Amino acid sequence: MILQFIDSFLILVCNPIRDFCVKFFKGVANIGFNATKTIKSYGFKVHMKVHMCTRYILNYVVTEVLVHDAKVAETQIDNCLASKILAYVGYVGQKLQDNFIQKGYQL
């Protein structure tokens, strides 16, 4: 059985204290709240799909920090070879699970 994993991580452009005065990537990056670290962050978010056995990156998308993981999840599973996809709680939702089941995947 082929297992794949989808997850995301932040790329911070500056320290949180400078979020509102930074000029780098103005209009491209934005400020969002990281619930895991309980901080506001300015930068980008990388959403990535990884093969569990080989640990190769199979697909990735770079978005603004505010983009929710569930919104990118469907683009991550395009042309997916696995029948089971592991993800953390940010990808849990009935609508998303229904979409995955219709495409033949178990989330």
Image: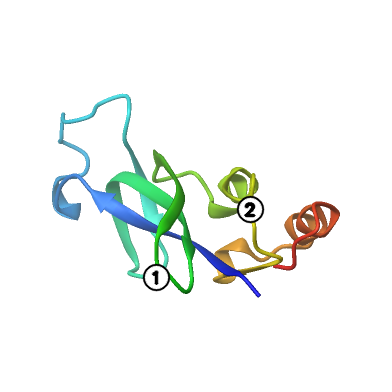
Mark 1 surroundings within 10 Å by alpha-carbon count, few (fewer than 14), some (14 through 19), many (20 or more) = few
Give the residue drawn at x 49%, y 65%.
Answer: 51
Residue 29, image x, y percentages: 31, 35
Q: Secondary structure at mark 1?
A: loop
Give the residue drawn at x 20%, y 53%.
Answer: 16
Number of the label disc, if any, that sits on residue 36:
1
- In the rendered structure, the answer to whether residue 16 lies left or right of residue 70 reads left
Residue 92, image x, y percentages: 66, 66
Q: Answer above or below: position of 26 versus 74.
A: above
Residue type at mark 1? Thr
Q: Nearer the viewer, residue 19 or 103?
A: 103
Number of the label disc, if any, that sits on residue 90:
none
- In the rendered structure, the answer to whether residue 37 lies left or right of residue 101 reads left
Q: Secondary structure at mark 2?
A: loop
The quadrant of the rendering that contains the C terminus is bottom right
Work out how far the residue at label 2 is from the one at label 1, CA to CA, in angstroms. Answer: 28 Å
Residue type at mark 2? Cys
The quadrant of the rendering that contains the N terminus is bottom right
Q: Nearer the viewer, residue 102 or 18?
A: 102
- Res 39 → quadrant: bottom left
Residue 30, image x, y percentages: 34, 37
Residue occupying the far top of the picture:
27
Write down the residue under mark 2. 80
Give the residue drawn at x 14%, y 46%.
Answer: 18
Foreground disc of the pair 2, 1: 2
